[in-house]
Amino acid sequence: MSKILMGPKTLIYPMPTLLVGANVDGKPNFMAVAWGGIANGDPPMISVAIRPQRYTHRGITQNLTFSVNVPSTGLIREVDYCGIVSGSEVNKVEVCQFNVLYGKLGNAPLIEQCPINLECKVEHILELGSHSLIVGRVEETHFSESCLTDGKPDVNKIKPFVFTADPARQYQAFGEVMGRAFSIGRELKAKE
Amino acid sequence: MSKILMGPKTLIYPMPTLLVGANVDGKPNFMAVAWGGIANGDPPMISVAIRPQRYTHRGITQNLTFSVNVPSTGLIREVDYCGIVSGSEVNKVEVCQFNVLYGKLGNAPLIEQCPINLECKVEHILELGSHSLIVGRVEETHFSESCLTDGKPDVNKIKPFVFTADPARQYQAFGEVMGRAFSIGRELKAKE
């Protein structure tokens, strides 16, 4: 098996697709974010990487709150749109016809149509170069009742999707179940 | 559409599945990590959340280097195994039959069988509670030639997968292509 060098700037990597929201000058705005991940378990925290020039970034630093909304595949057009245009030029909430809710924090806008909404309080901001790595503490999670099965979150109803970077530049649904986590690896215990 | 509160500790979220590697006391070890994401574009950085008690964490703080290896679906057993057992008790490299390579940094172990390998130098460590958020600068990316099509990375050959958390606790392949990124959203421009 032979390897080639791609240089450090090739960030090929499985990425989520999220809508990060903030109130900017008192009005809700959302941007598409693929550069994020869970940052801590207890207390629960999440990180998102956002360029300081972005309109949403301004809202996050104004309020020190933001939301992370996990969209379903049915919202792909809206998600992509929120990644193409700036809230400084258009009212994305209107164009996308998002129903905006507020929860515990009062000023982190949540998208009703997204099955999962996290309300976050800014805990750290690391200036890393092109992007600010914003670490938020998850204060509350909202979940659409229609995506539950027997009272539990059902990934087949949530229908999250991933972003596949260059050169594919596409959104892909979660696909075939390949194995049970914390289980299928036990087969290797016989080789210990 | 009605919403329910899940509490802050429900980290439901699309997550990658990765093998993070480090030399611990001079010997290569790998752990499964789902809590990570891209942290910066220029210079390229990546973040991973790891409990300080973990064996791999010891190696990362010893060398201030680590690797991020993106596995293919064919390695699901090995990935799950690396998340179940500790390198303090078993030699995971032997059990999983990983071919270990070293690149530019010299002490960040790479798994030849994984199509993508990032060599990282620790830039920041944030102690957030249960986990350390380790931000690494990507110094080099290695890519398996067999996963290229016309000289470019091909997601259908890389075959990355995601981790679906509770209650599903499963690994899922990348599935159906739902749309072109930076493109399908343009359909909404007519509504501006």
Image: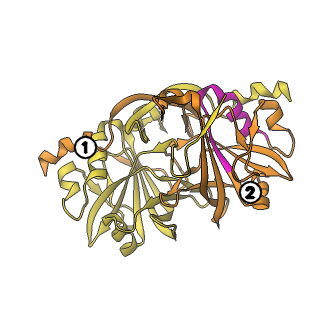
Chain colours: A yellow, B orange
Disc 2: which residue: B60
- Residue at the image position 63 percent from the left and 55 percent from the top: B49
- Residue at the image position 49 percent from the left and 46 percent from the top: B13
Place of residue A85 in the rendered image (x, y in percent of width and height, measured from the top left): 25, 55
Dot 2: chain letter: B
Type of the residue with mark 2: Ile
Give whichever of A183, B6 is nearer the camera.
Answer: A183
Type of the residue with mark 1: Gly
User: Mark 1: which secondary structure?
Assistant: helix
- Residue at the image position 34 percent from the left and 32 percent from the top: B178
Q: Judge whether residue B132 can be spotted in this image.
A: no
Q: CA distance from mark 1 to mark 2?
A: 41 Å
Q: Is residue B155 above or below residue A22?
A: above
Label 1, residues with CA under 10 Å away: few <14, some 14-19, many ≥20: many
Q: Residue furthest bottom?
A: A62
Tell me which label, 1 or 2, sits earlier in the chain. 2
Q: Is residue A69 above or below residue B92?
A: below
Q: Is residue A151 above or below residue A186?
A: below
**Which dot marks residue B185?**
1
Give whichever of A122, A16 is nearer the camera.
Answer: A16
Q: Is residue A157 above or below residue B15?
A: above
For residue A93, side relative to residue B6 (left or right)? left
Magenta region, residue range = B67-85
Dot 1: chain letter: B
Name the quarter where the N terminus of chain B is drawn. Answer: top left
